[in-house]
Image: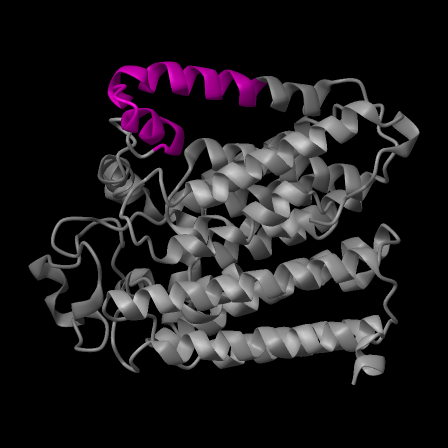
Amino acid sequence: MIRLLASPAHRLAALGLLLLAVTVGALAIQVPGADTVGAAPQSNAFIGVVAVGLAVYLLAVRLVLRERLPRAALWTILGIAVLLRAALLPALPFLSTDIYRYVWDGQVQAAGINPYRYIPADPALERLRDPAVYPLINRKDYARTIYPPAAQLVFAAVGQVSHSVTGMKLAMLGFEALGMLAMLAVLRGAGLPSARILIYAWNPLALWSFARDGHVDAVAIGLLGIALLARTRRRYGLAGALLGAATLVKVLPVAVAPAFVRGGRLWRPMLAGVAVIAVLYLPYLAAGPNVFGFAGGYGAEEGYDTGVGYWLLAGLGHLGLSPPSLLRTYLVCAGLTLAALALRIAFGPNRQTAPDAVALCRDAGLLAALTTCAASPHYAWYYPWLALPAVVAPAPALIWLGSAPILFLIDPFDDRFLWPSLVFVPALFLAARSLRQACTAPLSALPEGTAP
């Protein structure tokens, strides 16, 4: 046995099977059919088990980045990835109820109704209510849908063929698969090992976010993956259009736009992206101002209007400082920092030594990570998209931020600073270490990525 595990390929398979066992074990903790994990002991046990899965995943990432694996290892990686998703797909979601709103919006559009027009509890939609979906919609008594037009078009398409949660989850996994296939093509084009796809394919946060709970972020990941592929093949207009569509699934992907126009290639991707955004909004404009849905109300619910929703300001609040009084300063500083980085990436001198695909994903990953950290959402499924550029440019902080927020699935303290610090503090340490290495290493010796 020891001799077998001495082979990197066999160690990879062993880690994959262990991750599968841990995932199934975590799944078994929840009471079948319940809409939550359970009481506090069950919740604590669940988060402990998924943390073990995170550790197994990080060991697998380290193996892939440091060892030479045979080409056949790709099939092991993809096979385990399929098994992991198949294990989580059949059961109903219990970590989030967002998918019921997706299914509902699809049903509303299948009935020929603008999804931004009514809240689900409006009497005008009474005929669409069913016992499987409607009772589980969150905020159904006061909130219009928050999801942008590209997401709504996906909900509408799924609603034409299925009114089930499983059908919606399958659609999300389909987009996720498109993203992974696109990144495999980017890896091949850059001459990098295909086994690096494991960085996304085995990411436990992606597994629980999409195979289990079916979050719409998977659509943005799929579109972003194809956009990155198009950009590496110098299809600038197509890349901009796809990035625009991804932005109208989840707003955060707009943060990587400066990486797409790097080197002065501005107008074609920018115009294509803006055009796609305008065209996607057209079918829904009859809703008037309501076309932006519950976006404003959501920000207030999450504490962004008072500052307590931001990790750093929440921490300062523990020290007796007032998050509301610091909010403007925080937003100005974060905005200026991100703007300076965006301008540097988009228009700064091009002194890269890495291949174009690596530089693109490195810059996109940096922009994505800083923007997401500045917003510091406390929902775990906002973070797996960071693992996508990490496949090509595997910075330690990016890999950590794309997977470690699995700890956010359950917060035993219900606090916006203490528990999230388990993710953000190590990320800051990893980022500082990488920055120090970049500053001290000769330019020709700068690595394309370092294992965590």
- Image side of residue 241 versus residue 112, left or right: right
Residue nearest the viewer, comparing 3 with 290? 3
249 or 381: nearer the viewer: 381
Residue 114, x across and y down, in percent: 27, 54
Q: Quadrant of residue 240?
A: top right
Q: Nearer the viewer, residue 157 or 379?
A: 379
Residue 258 image position (x, y, % from top left): 64, 29
Which residue is located at x 38 percent, y 47 percent?
148
Question: Furthest-front residue in view?
Answer: 2
- 111 on left or right of 73: left
Q: Is residue 195 left or right of residue 387?
A: right
Q: Is residue 331 magenta?
A: yes
The part of the image, by quadrant, that contains residue 60 is bottom right
**Total count of labels:** 0
Q: Position of residue 264 (x, y in %)?
A: 74, 23
User: Magenta part of the protein: which range?
Assistant: 310-339
Q: Measuring 32% from the left and 40% from the top, which residue is drawn there?
A: 416
